[in-house]
Image: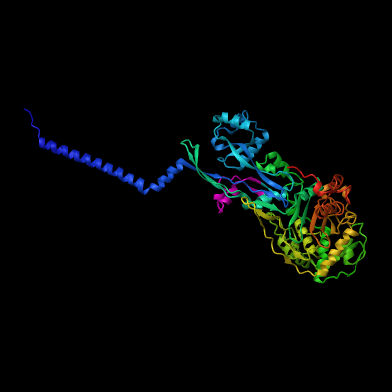
Amino acid sequence: MTELRNVEADLSRFRSRVFVISLVVLVCFALLLARLVYLQVWRHDELRAQAETNRTAIVPIVPNRGLITDRNGIVLASNYSAYTLEITPSKTGALDQTLDELSKVIDITPRERRRFKKLLEESRNFESLPIRTRLSDTEVARFAAQRFRFPGVEIKARLFRSYPYGELASHVIGYIGRINQAEKERIDESEDQANYRGTEYIGKLGVEQSFESQLHGITGVEQIETSAGGRATRKLASTPATPGNGVVLSIDIKLQKLIEDMFGERRGALVALDPKTGEVLAFVSKPTFDANLFVEGIDQENWQMLNGSPDKPLLNRALRGTYPPGSTYKPFMALAALETGKRSAATLINDPGFYMFGGHRFGSPENERGGIMDMHRAIVESSNAYFYSLANELGVDAMHDFMKPLGFGQLTGLDLLGEVRGILPSQEWKRRYYKRPDQQRWYAGETISLGIGQGYNSFTMLQLAQAMAIVANQGIKRQPQLVTAIEDATTRSRSPVAPAPPVDLGYKPEHLDTIRKAMVDVTQVGTSARVFAGAAYTSGGKTGTAQAVGLGKNEKYNASKMEEHLRDHSLYVAFAPADEPKIALAVIVENAGFGSASAAPIARRVFDYWLVGQYPSEQDLLAVSKGQAGPPLGPTRPASEVPWLAP
């Protein structure tokens, strides 16, 4: 029997199913529409930015670093562009194998490999590190043809720093180097973080470090469109970088070279100042080093040679080397006696060739004349006994209080980072410096040797030069200044760097005249008279010989029987012309003996150059560099006619 279907029931079920399906479809379309509204309206800006980021890239444009020039416009630090071959270690496979394969395409020396591995130790794994620099066009083309074989290796065009005169004035100029982790963390925490995007090098020493903010410039940005593979296809927008400003130094690089040549292979330092302005005319530390070695990352061999050398070429002796001033301290001791009223210039002191105190005999050089000394004669003939007794009369704390305003044992404020204080002793200093109670006590016998610039006294040549400049400048103290102007990179206009205001130390003019007249006679009839014979000007000076090591109670100094590094230091302080000083200096030649033998001849040639434009003969230069000169040998040359060192 055939079953009759209920058509109405079937239609009802069909309609229900159609309704449910329609409802589901409608809900799906509603959800899609809601999602579309959400994405296109509510998240429009965010997604647009993401899409733009995927399509474009923001690339920093590293600015050209500013130039460094001397007072006459001679460029001491500049830039050049070159191609470099760089490796990102995290993108390569076996690094040694990559280097081996690369060396078949482009020459890579063992030294370059060692330098690269040193950089690798100091850098993070994802940083791009140079393995070869200054590639030729042929080498660039050769690598480009083989690039597919070397993932993580690429050619980059970079700006490099150049120091055209190599070792000359390297302690003043300094150098740049790759930013290390500590420096990066400091930058990230500073307001300059954005300005250092893309920057890999930073000033490490000297002016390069001290004036980093001026020299660096302002980083630009470039917006580029990229392909799906991340390659740049076209430039969309660009904000150019602003080059760093130029820094103008007060030093005369030709004078600087003359002085460095006169030191020869010897160690030492010289600082020359303009007493009236505080400008640094020369700032010499010997030996020096080639700053170009650090630009691309110094290799291990050169680093060990510099860092392990007993001559310490990396030490800035003018800024950080401290020495006993020896007899160059005596004019300042005499000024202390006058200003404190402990002695007058006419006070007579007997010098028997020694000074007895507490049963101890404080000696004098065997060639010292001795006899009855007033202040003038004591300075001219460098009487030890006169100043031993003066130290005893003044006492250590009175000496400290007088010498402190002159800058001894203090930071001078020079616009170069890294200056040290040295030691200006006092009873309070000794209590702070030593830990054991028996060491903290000041003994009266320790005061005596301070009077002749020995004992705990330890100062930099910068401090000694500043003190000399104060005496030369009628007691007016000027802060030493190395940078005199900042040159705008765009307009080339110069903005002078304002010097610190002068400070009048309040010394009586007649007291200063007494000291200066005695120092003038040092160059006329005293210990440096032979060296300054025939000079076209009158100068004032004071020789000094400072012990590098102490001697035993009955031991006599004999340079010929001592190792070179144990011999006495040779010092000289001076100013010229005597009536209206334009230059004051302090110089030390380490382990070179008497001040009149090695240090004073250098000072004479500095004055000849600065005051009358004379340059020593080649014969004279050689003699001075060996410590065998007195007055100039051979005919001097006009400084303007001496060929300048080509960069």
Q: Is residue 616 visible?
A: yes
Residue 637 relative to residue 237: left or right: right
**In the image shown, does 406 or 400 lie closer to the viewer?**
406
Above-or-below relation of 472 to 250: below
User: Residue at coordinates 74% horizontally, 56% vertically from top-left?
Assistant: 280
Q: Quadrant of residue 165?
A: top right
Q: Does the magenta segment cover residue 614?
A: no
User: Residue at coordinates 38% horizontally, 47% vertically from top-left?
Assistant: 44
> Where does the image place residue 57, in percent across and percent down from the top left?
49, 42
**Count of picture labels:** 0
> Where does the image place residue 250, in percent across and percent down from the top left?
72, 54
> Where does the image place residue 212, in percent across and percent down from the top left?
63, 51
Q: Does the magenta segment cover residue 178?
A: yes
Residue 158 relative to residue 413: left or right: left
User: Residue at coordinates 64% horizontally, 48% vertically from top-left?
Assistant: 66
Residue 12 relative to residue 519: left or right: left
Above-or-below relation of 8 to 40: above
Q: Quadrant of residue 144?
A: top right
Q: Quadrant of residue 367?
A: bottom right
**In the image shown, does 260 or 582 lie closer to the viewer?**
582
Residue 569 relative to residue 69: left or right: right
- Per the rendered image, the range of residues in magenta is 176-204
Q: Quadrant of the C terminus?
A: top right
The residue lying furthest to the bottom in this view is 341
Above-or-below relation of 223 to 540: above
Q: Quadrant of the N terminus?
A: top left
Q: Is residue 359 visible?
A: no
**In the image shown, does 286 or 307 lie closer to the viewer?**
286
> Where does the image place residue 553, in percent across and percent down from the top left?
87, 57
The residue lying furthest to the left in this view is 1
